[in-house]
Each structure stands twice: as C-alpha cells, then as structure tokens.
Image: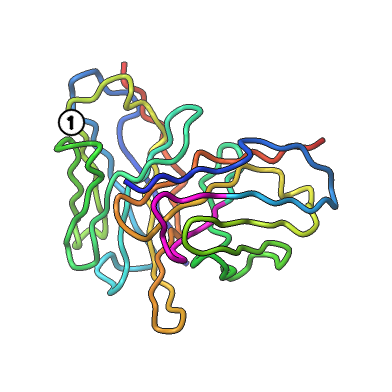
Amino acid sequence: QVQLQESGPGLVKPSQTLSLTCSVSGDSISSSGFYWNWIRQRPGNALEWLGYISYSGSTDYNPSLKSRVTISADTSENQFSLKLSSVTAADTAVFYCARVSYYEIYSIYYYAVDVWGQGTTVTVS
Amino acid sequence: DIQMTQSPSSLSASVGDRVTITCRASPGISSYLNWYQQKPGKAPKVLIYGSSSLQSGVPSRFSGSGSGTDFTLTISSLQPEDFATYYCQQSYITPWTFGQGTKVELK
C-alpha cells in the first residue's frame, strides 16, 4: 500500500522560500508511469495543481506560479520536494503531495490522483 | 487554462435521495474528467476517472457520465457517509484544473 507523508515548516515568513518534502513508502518514485505532484488548497478555496515530477525526472509546473515553483526528487531517499519562492500571505494553504496514476481504457490512457498525503498546513506570516 | 465550472456550489439532500452534480469544461476535454470526494480535514479521494469509470472500492451508487464539455456525477441513493464536498478535475492538459466544488449537506 502506497503512502505519502508531507513534512516541513508550518510557518514561513513573507518573501522567503517555502520548502516541503514528501516521503513515499510502498512504491518507488522511479516506478514507470507515475507522476508525483504537489497540490494546494487555500482556505475556503478549491484545489490548485502546482506541478509534478515524473518517474523519469521530467517536470511540469502551473504557469500561474510563474517561476516561483521548483519540484525535485531524491530517488535514494524515495522523496520528492517542493520549493515555492517569494511567498506572500496568499500562499497560505494546505499542501498535499499526491501520486497521479494512469488508467488504460480501450488503449487510451487517463490520469487521476489515486494516492494523497494527509496534507500539511503552511501559514505565511 | 481549461476552466472547470461546477453547479450547484452547494445542495441540501436527505438520505436516500438521488443527487446530481454537473461540471462544465471550457474548452472541451473529451472524457478526461475525474471526480473526487473530500471530507472535512481529509485529503480528497478519487471516485470516477475517465468520466465514467468507477475507481476500485468505490460503491456502485456513484456514477459519472459526459464527454466534451458537460459532465455529471450522480449518487443514486445518498448515504450518511456521502455528505462531503465533490470536485471535478480535468486531466486533458496541464495545468490540470479543478472545479470549485459542490458541498452536499444534510437537509
């Protein structure tokens, strides 16, 4: 059973860099076909996808965050990390790490988040 | 970005009711639509992927339909454990985007 666990500071000062790590157990982050994501949920708001690092190490980010977000992986520790720079109060949120898996239906591949971490609250103040 | 719009934003229902939530994508996303359930203080849980495929372990009272721009999530007979917030999400193209959520409350 795959489990994800976020860790990192719960309080970050404005203009600093928010850093979180996701520890993965029960699966290797190098396993083919999976994408390792960060998703946040601001107070009262919907879910926002921040980006992913794939099993092969490629990354994709939400352009709304411009160049502030970086996702990296440490395969030796089976972890992946999020860095969000120049934070403001608007970045206060619950941050989730999550695995996106693929599902094949009639030779078409569909992707969905099938495993989530419990979430960690980060306050910028 | 693809815009996902859910309706209603909230609804009140009773146990045993049939509940339908709609999600509209702009522009269209073929069948690349997922549904999630989130309970307070918990991470979301996937219910439906590919518009209509039921995730393993999810009760059969949940069903999804639609293609292109218009999608629905139906709960055939609402159970006490189904009171939660439901989100649609498109996986057609990044940035993957979510609807704003529909809160299902007890009438």
Which span of residues is magenta-colored?
Answer: B23-36
Question: Of the residues shown, which amino acid type is indicated by label 1?
Answer: Ser
Write down the chain letter for disc 1: A
Categorize mark 1 by other alpha carbons within 10 Å: few (<14), some (14-19), many (20+). Answer: some
Assign the C terminus of chain A to one quadrant of the image: top left
Given residues B104 and A116, the one toward you in this image is B104
Q: Residue at x 23, y 25 (%)?
A: A87
Pick the residue in front: B45 or B75. Answer: B75
Q: Position of residue B90 (x, y in %)?
A: 42, 55
- Whether A116 is drawn above or below A94: the answer is below
Closer to the camera in the image, A105 or A98: A105
Q: Position of residue B101 (x, y in %)?
A: 55, 40
Give the answer, above or below, for where A1 lies relative to A66.
below
**Horizontal placement of B106 versus B68: left or right?**
right
Quadrant location of residue A85? top left
**Residue under label 1:** A85
